[in-house]
Image (cartoon, rainbow, N blue to C red):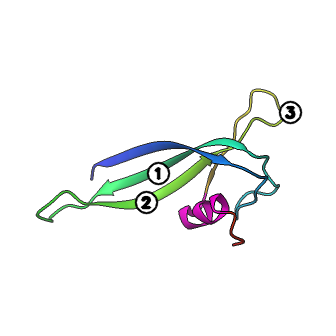
Amino acid sequence: MTTRTTTRSVAFARPFTLDGIDESQPAGIYVIETDEDLIDGVSMLAYRRTGTRIRLHEDRLRPGIVETVSIDPAAVEAALADIPT
């Protein structure tokens, strides 16, 4: 199965929280990565999302360490729209 990964940057206007992340994250620009697998056996190109991750900002107490966390894409969209999840 063929996998593709897309990357996009998103800007959060306010601090936010997401399931799977222990602490509130500061406002700013974050990188979101989405993995999708090609669906075999269909007459046109079609992909199924298999995972979404967010790269968190570097922690001041742990310089040089950047954490990537699996997230729910719908929760990200709700946080970007500033809608409580």
Q: At 86% across and 33% down in the image, what residue appears?
A: 60
Q: At 81% across and 28% down in the image, what residue appears?
A: 63
Disc 3 to disc 1: CB gap under 8 Å: no
Mark 1, mark 2: which one is toward the viewer? 1
Answer with left or right where residue 57 lies relative to residue 41.
right
Residue 55 x %, y %? 63, 43
Q: Which mark is residue 34?
A: 1
Q: Which mark is residue 46?
A: none
Kindly report the distance in space between the C-alpha atoms of the residues bearing marks 3 and 1.
Answer: 27 Å
- Would you name the residue on which mark 3 appears? 60
Residue 80 drawn in magenta: yes
Residue 72 figure quarter: bottom right
Residue 27 x %, y %? 76, 46
Looking at the image, tell me whether mark 1 or mark 2 is earlier in sequence order.
1
Residues in magenta, as a range = 71-81
Kindly report the distance in space between the C-alpha atoms of the residues bearing marks 2 and 3.
Answer: 31 Å
Q: Disc 3 residue type? A: Arg
